[in-house]
Image (cartoon, helix red, strand yellow):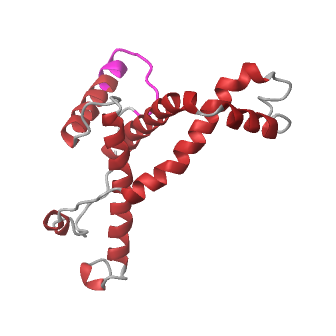
Amino acid sequence: GYWSPDSGPDGPFAKLREMTLDELSKIKVQQAMAKEKGITQDVSFVTFREGFQKENQRRKEALANGTVIYGPKQHDESAYYFIRFGDLSYQLKRKVCKETAPAIPEQEIRKFYDEYKDKAAALKDAPFDTVRERIAEEIAERNFDKQLPILFQSAKVETKEDLIRTLLPRHDAKPVTD
């Protein structure tokens, strides 16, 4: 069939598998970095699942007590996962940038200031000394954004083919409704 491994190495199943493994590799690289930087202690599914259940329980109790909550009454696993991952990714970027910004050479910061002082509202009419630290952070963020794809490409990815073969698309799945 169309969505089976039998569609060949250029078929839709193979392309979907490749894209999924690529995305999961990016997530795992960032999780490993966050763990290494002390942002999180555990990136396991068990810990994620416990947090998911606790958050939904907290929301349920808050609603029962008349407390305002932001977002849905209950998260589904997929949405909650990407909320948590987005938070983790942001924290990682902030931490790396705070660590690397002080090492950015003064001449690079000055060059950025001179190049953007008439173009960026935040720099317009601002003396260099008042925006120096923020410029260093901006340069660090840009450097981080350039380095991340390189880290993704150089990551050693190991897959458990026997497990992946058990994850074939199913046609008996029912849509989730609430």
Q: Residue at x 72, y 24 (%)?
A: 131
Percent from the top left, x then y, of residue 151?
A: 42, 52
Quarter of the figure with residue 36 = top left
Percent from the top left, x then y, of residue 167?
A: 20, 65
Quadrant in the picture for the N terminus: bottom left
User: Is 168 placed left or right of 34 in the picture?
Assistant: left
> In the rendered structure, does residue 82 fall within the stretch colored magenta?
no
Residue nearest the observer in this picture, 17 or 151: 151
Q: Which residues are magenta?
A: 60-72
Q: On screen, 122 above or below 78?
A: above
Quadrant in the picture for the C terminus: top left
Q: On screen, 59 above or below 84?
A: above
Residue nearest the observer in this picture, 174 or 151: 151
> In the rendered structure, does residue 61 fall within the stretch colored magenta?
yes
Q: Residue at x 35, y 19 (%)?
A: 62
Percent from the top left, x then y, of residue 72?
A: 42, 34
Q: Is residue 76 visible?
A: no
User: Is 43 placed left or right of 33 in the picture?
Assistant: left
Percent from the top left, x then y, of residue 19?
A: 39, 65
User: Which residue is most to the left?
Assistant: 162
User: Is 160 placed left or right of 99 in the picture?
Assistant: left
Q: Is residue 46 visible?
A: yes
Quarter of the figure with residue 21 = bottom left
User: Is 32 placed left or right of 95 in the picture?
Assistant: left
Quarter of the figure with residue 172 = bottom left
Q: Residue at x 48, y 29 (%)?
A: 99
For the image, the number of numbered tags is 0
